[in-house]
Amino acid sequence: MDALTLKKQLKTAAAAPVYLVLGTQSVMMAETRKAFLNLVPKEERVMNVGSYDLEEESLSTALDDAMSAPFFGKRRLVFLNKPAFLTTGGEKGKMKQNPELLKNYLTHPQLSTILVIMAPYEKLDGRKGIVKELKKEAVTVEVQLLNEQSARKNIQSQVSAAGFQFMQGALDELVKRTNADYSLMVANLKKLMILNYQDQEITVASVKKLVPQSLDSNVFDLVTTVLNHQQTQSLDLYRQLLDSEQQPLQINAVLVSQFRLLLQLKILSARGLSQGTLAKRLNVHPYRVKLGLQMVRKFSLTDLMNAYLGLIRCERALKTTSRSPELLFQLFMLQYSQQVRK
């Protein structure tokens, strides 16, 4: 199951004896940990919650804690963090662990304990017997990158729970400026709440004031003007990027990357691949895929290819000539417009 399903399940159903939480999304890992902590009353946590770093602490000690009865409470909660011995090459870690101890625990888990194995890794070593046993006996929770819809829903929920509200367009602006990256949205949300603590209203203006627009986001606007042959607007945006102390080669590299993605989306979407499949295959955030698909529907493959090749030539010129970046970009725009007229 995913982390959002787990949160809902923990509120309505009895917890399982053992969970494996797997993934590299740190914010979602932290929120999943909090969901488990909420199962134990605050006044009982000192005595009934244990947390062990298995890169530094003994698995034996952690499992002894898990086998203990709860102290003046209904349940114990024990976290096993960073179980590197479950990964490829994990045996080379600082602390040598005996996997058999965990295997024995899985056979006869302490029913008054919730054992949560927090594995901040892309994957475990499926060839290991203990990993096979763990996936069979434990409830696996995969902490994945949230899509735009889920990220919006989570952020909206957090804002409402804190007594704040997004004014019209503010959430859209936050999504745009963070490329729907949930971790970035959460980090900026805290600052927005501090800025607007008096009226508890988050506006578009406050988002623009506090949340920096990423280079990718700025360049996406530039890509739009380039494809629409808006030479004046394109040059203005390019100058703004230079004025913000972005390096010309870096700007051009991001432009090339954006057009490469658009070409891939144009070709693969024509084969009938869905938005979700494209995001996984190209290893790109679903939000970028969504925006890219909206764009490529308006332009031909030739348009995209001409722009891409023109930027490759521009990159070569940036590296081999002393002409100003601004002039080279102007020449690129001029040549691109002439190609379209032919």
Image (spheres, rainbow, N blue to C red):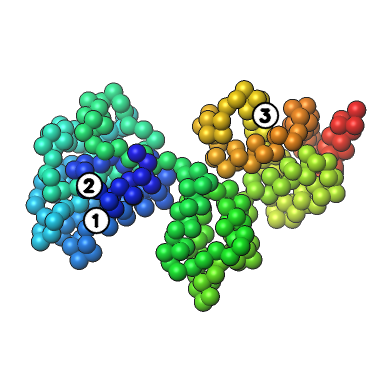
Name the quadrant containing residue 341. top right
Taking the spot 52% from the left edge, 34% from the top edge, the residue there is 276
Give the residue type at disc 2: Ala
What residue sits 20% from the left and 55% below the top?
A: 49
Residue 163 % position (x, y) = 45, 69
Rendering coords of residue 43 (x, y %): 20, 66
Residue 172 position, x and y percent, is 60, 55
In the image, 313: left or right of 42? right
Q: Quadrant of the C terminus?
A: top right
Q: Residues within 10 Å of mark 1 (few under 14, many from 20)?
A: some
Q: Looking at the picture, does residue 156 appear above or below residue 254? A: below
Residue indicated by mark 1: 39
168 and 84: which is toward the camera = 168
Query: Gap in Å between the C-alphas at discs 2 and 3?
Result: 45 Å
Q: Position of residue 282 (x, y in %)?
A: 56, 31
Residue tagged 3: 266
- Indicate the secondary structure of the residue bearing disc 3: helix
Disc 2 to disc 1, C-alpha distance: 9 Å
Neighbour tally class for label 3: few under 14, some 14-19, many 20 plus, Cα within 10 Å: many
Q: Secondary structure at mark 1?
A: loop
- Disc 1 from disc 3: Cα separation: 47 Å
Name the foreground residue: 17 vs 45: 17
Residue type (three-letter) at the residue carrying disc 3: Lys
